[in-house]
Structure formats: C-alpha cells, structure tokens
Image (spheres, rainbow, N blue to C red):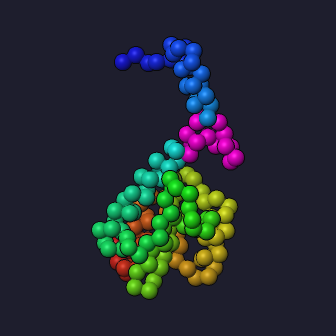
Amino acid sequence: MARLRLDDLPPHMRAQAEAQINRDWAPEDDGRSSIAKKVDIMEIDDIHAPIVAWLERHGLWASTIYSRPDKRSTIKEGWPDFTVIHRGKACMVECKRPGSKPTKVQKELIDSLLHKGENVIVAYNADQAIRYIRETLLNEHD
C-alpha cells in the first residue's frame, strides 16, 4: 500500500490537510497538542474500561460517580476519576498511566481527602484499582 504524501495532493486539498495537521498538532494552553491528549485518553481508557466492567459485574456501577476522560467534567476540578459508594462506605480512585503523576490540583485535593480520613488512592493499572475497591468496600482480601 503506497503512502500518500502532502505533495501528492492537489493544491486546494493540500492546504486543507496542512491546516488540519496544524490544528491537531498545535500546542494548546497547556503546551500539549490535541493529538497528544487523544493518545493520553486512549491509554487511560485501557485502565478505566476494565474497572467499569468490573463495577458493572459486581453491581457497583449504579452507585459510582465516574469522570470520563473524553468529556469535560462537571465534577469539582481534581476530583478522582471514580467515586464508588457501597453500603454506607465510599472510596475514590484516581487513575494515572504508569510514569505519570497527579496534577497539582489533583494532588492537593487527594491530600485534603486523605487528611479528612477519606479512602482514596492513585492507581496505575486496573488491577490495583479493583483490588483497592474490593478491599475497601467489600472487605475482600487476596
């Protein structure tokens, strides 16, 4: 399969393609392009999807507040991705890709929640998040 190069396009189509590339790869307010952000969303979805499936299988999804990575959140800025409530107990999980860290706002909010005695964790994979939810809310230990 031959690759199409910008130079192979008619001039009017080349201008449109170049404009789209510039929009997609241009840094936004935070210095990262929308393409880079989409890659982050796909990677974080690899962590979120198994958690969502596990919550649904265990009947916990209906009592979960979930901040989707692909939508603008209506939850307080920095709030963890998952807040799961079960039989009067709650726990929160902030998901991060391995090697990444919570933002300053997330760290401050998580520290504040921990200081108040809330159950919250930063998880770097789905297994870690699920294990935390099981242990905290269902009293199931490995």
Outermost residue toward the left?
57
* 54 w.r.t. 98: above or below: below
Q: Is residue 122 visible?
A: no
Q: Position of residue 138 (x, y in %)?
A: 37, 79
Q: Position of residue 28 (x, y in %)?
A: 67, 43
Tell whether 28 sits left or right of 88.
right
Q: Quadrant of residue 107?
A: bottom right
Q: Quadrant of residue 103?
A: bottom right
- Give the camera-side residue of 92 and 56: 56
- Give the camera-side residue of 57 and 99: 57
Q: Residue at x 43, y 58 (%)?
A: 48
Q: Residue at x 57, y 25 (%)?
A: 16
Q: Is residue 57 visible?
A: yes
Tell whether 19 sits left or right of 130.
right
* 129 w.r.t. 34: above or below: below
In the image, the segment drawn in magenta is: 24-37
Tell whether 88 sits left or right of 117.
left
Tell whether 77 sits left or right of 60.
right
Q: Position of residue 122 (x, y in %)?
A: 53, 65
* 114 w.r.t. 130: above or below: below
State yes or no: residue 31 in magenta.
yes
